[in-house]
Image (spheres, grey):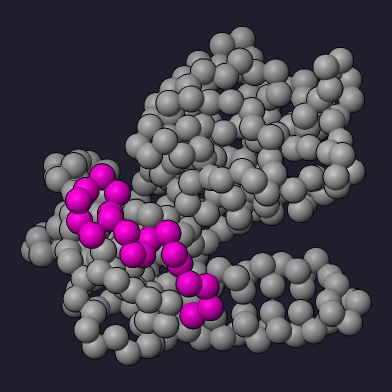
Amino acid sequence: MAVRQTAGRLLSAATVAGTTAAAGVATEAGESLLAMARIIPGIFKHSRCRNSVYPQSDVRRYPVPDESVFWSQTYSDYQPPCHESPILKGKEWADLEIENSSFKPKWNELDGKVNRVSFVGSYEIWDDCPLNPFGRTGIRGRGILGRWGPNHAADPVVTRWKMDDSGQQPVVHPDSGKRILQMCAIERQDCGEWAIPGGMVDPGEKVSATLRREFLEETMDNDAGEVAGEVEQFFAAGTEIYKGYVDDPRNTDCAWMETVAVNFHDESGLVVGRFPLHAGDDAAKVRWMDVGEEVKLYASHSNIVKRVVDMREAHW
């Protein structure tokens, strides 16, 4: 109920903002509300976690048509299979099975060091399980996610301007006339898709620490070497781009991904832009990638990067 009320308030505010913008009185607050309205419960329909085979398994999701995504919509024939990957058993970073009598989580609050609070509001509990606030996914259980309910991640969007051969001038796209932005991207080993080099927030860990750690693990193989001090300074400040739900192929009816995405931009290209990149952790490859409309990224990463592009007034 709390999630639906939040969605209603945001939609109402977004509608007002959209009317104002259409009248030529666009504001940053109005644009922000319109962006939020695209990814809030009861409005946004996730697609990457529906009508497919669940990742790293042969379990096919129960079909969920667009008109049956939200829990408020009747779907009497809905019979999703339950799937929990065997890789979760015995792992310190994973919750116990929901049927385990010793597992007594505190939903919608900080449970010891484990954060079970969702960025999108209070989620409902049904049959002892958290309910994905964005609706049906065609599968119950946790899949390969460690936590029941929200699984919190942090995504550092590290960017620089693409420079010409002289290294002195930013490259301007001939069609848009805008500078071309480059992002540090990794190729994920689990699916082969290019992505932001992010990862899960450890229990009790500050998001700022996760952002720095994940970048080092996946793009520099945990070795900053002589530039360690510059890395530390670079990640001391960034601009939050997004905080909320992620349309991730690993999501289920009972477990889902949420993230905090922060942009760390090297305006001159002389700091992080010159770091030697080495794939590590769960990254197969790492490179500086030109950002544009044609770039396809993992999960909702393209939407996050587009926000950075808009903020930097770069080519898309």
Q: Residue at x 78, y 32 (%)?
A: 161
Residue at the extreme top of the image, as rendered: 226
13 with respect to 243 (left or right): right
Q: Position of residue 66 (x, y in %)?
A: 43, 77
91 with respect to 244 (left or right): left
Residue 102 appears anywhere in the view: yes
Asked whether 47 falls inside the magenta stretch, the response is: yes
Determine the image quadrant of residue 115: bottom left
Q: Position of residue 22 (x, y in %)?
A: 84, 79
Q: Residue at x 80, y 45 (%)?
A: 314
State which region is magenta: 42-60
191 with respect to 215 (left or right): left
Q: Residue at x 37, y 81 (%)?
A: 68
- Above or below for 83 versus 33: above
> How many numbered marks appear?
0
Chief secondary structure of the magenta portion: loop
Asked whether 246 falls inside the magenta stretch, the response is: no
Instruction: Look at the image and tell me in which quarter the N terminus lies.
Output: bottom left
- Above or below for 84 versus 99: above
